[in-house]
Amino acid sequence: MLRNVILFILCFCLTILSSCAEHQCETLASTDVWKAQLMTLDPGHYHAALVQKSMYEQVCPLAYVYAPDGPDVDNHLEQIKRFNSREENPTSWRQKVYKGDDFLEKMLTNKCGNVVVLSGKNRRKTEYIKASIDAGLNVFCDKPMCITPEGFEVLKQAFDTARRKNLLLCDIMTERYNVTCILQKLLVLDKDLFGEIETGTPENPAVIKESVHHFFKYVAGAPLKRPAWYFDTTQQGEGLVDVTTHLIDLVMWTCTPEETLDYKTDVQMKQARRWPTVITPEQYEKVTGVAGFPDYLKTKLNDEGSLPCYSNGQMIFTLKGTHVKLSVAWNYEAPEGGGDTHHSLFRGSKAHVIIRQGKEQNYRPEVYVEPAPGGNADEVAAALKKAVTSLQSKFPGLSANKEGDGWHLMIPDTCRIGHEAHFRNVMEYYLGYLPKGQLPDWEVSFMIAKYYITTRALELARQ
């Protein structure tokens, strides 16, 4: 308790003594008291705030924000205030904010922390990453890290510099902590149950991941307000380079766990295409709160005055010879009673392991196991029973019910945590490697391969 009081007083003094804030911040961040002191740069997405939904023993409760003045940074600060004032497990963050057009230069000059948090407009994100790494700062970055082939080349340079300087550069892959994704991976890695992964073909891939999202939705009972720039793909990025990062990461994490990849030899892009979701002026206002399209979008409107937003895409590539098909689609709004959907299929020589999240599942992801065509159902049943039994120590109450030709894994609600809670998991993963200044080689190779795939797919789809 005394230690916590002392730490709080130190942070408070750091805020008050603005005349020597730079010196104090650098000294504070370099002590053994905390592993990290956060500097949030140009926040524009609510994920920036979710990084601070929890407190961390290793992170100083004084956080810095550098941003241009405007609604994006105001919304970010308001969200942190809500975390601090909530009734259950309130946080105790103190925010020291700099607003100005020279926000990037000010952060790089002051260096009031050692970890830069990035989540906002994606157009400058790669620039922010490289500038931060060049300045000797660690980076904790929301996806995507880059949205163009040119940005990918800059990102590779940033990873090279991070390696030389022993700096941590990592993106936030929350889906690895989704219980259905974890179970799918564990079952795929069970050779007695799954067998060997199929090679597949472009027409019949061995791995398929498809997700459908919606621009207008309710989060925690309130309409999700998106920034005005969200529909500008030059700032947000097209669908092929955004949500697909999660899907690609899950494919590599499941098929080649902790295996260092070389994107030049292990990945081959086969096909890619893109198509728009058309947003009317009324829809745009409903989801952003902004009346009328801003000037930077007006040149992109169609003859009817609506915006074709290239938020949808599909790609087919091979990962070490295995054919993978990924598809992401964004509709404006889900039908009554509907929601986002996710379909994930891994085809093995003995069994298929599938995640379904549709109307039949009440739009909640569920895991299924089915015998491969021509496979032995009795052998699959026995292997699944053994697998579920071994998993019950980690997932108490887990069971498998026979449904049709396959089985449905019954996952207790206590094993399911929401998307927002996963940010704590990723942060704790990041903090575990921060003192070393290095992620595992396989993790870095995953990120480089992932952004090669997204940007190469975009390049191919635009041809």
Image (cartoon, rainbow, N blue to C red):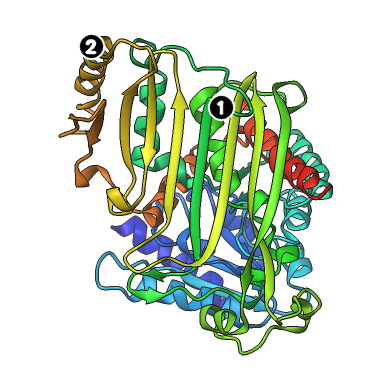
Kind of element beneath mark 2? helix
Tell me the residue that label 2 is attached to: 378
Residue pictured at 20% horizontal, 27% vertical: 392
Residue pictured at 37% horizontal, 72% vertical: 84
Query: Tag count in the figure?
Result: 2
Amino acid type of the residue tagged 2 in the rendering: Asp
Position of 144 relative to 119 (above/below): above
Q: Nearer the viewer, residue 407 or 191?
A: 407
Q: x and y percent of residue 37 in the render?
A: 55, 57
Q: Residues within 10 Å of mark 1 (few under 14, many from 20)?
A: few
Q: Residues within 10 Å of mark 2 (few under 14, many from 20)?
A: few
Q: x and y percent of residue 395 in the render?
A: 23, 33
Amino acid type of the residue tagged 1 in the rendering: Asn
Tell me the residue that label 1 is attached to: 204
Question: Looking at the rendering, which quadrant does residue 439 occupy?
Answer: top right
Horizontal placement of 232 versus 342: left or right? right
Position of 261 relative to 60 (above/below): above
Residue pictured at 61% horizontal, 25% vertical: 323
Residue pictured at 56% horizontal, 29% vertical: 252
Kind of element beneath mark 1? loop
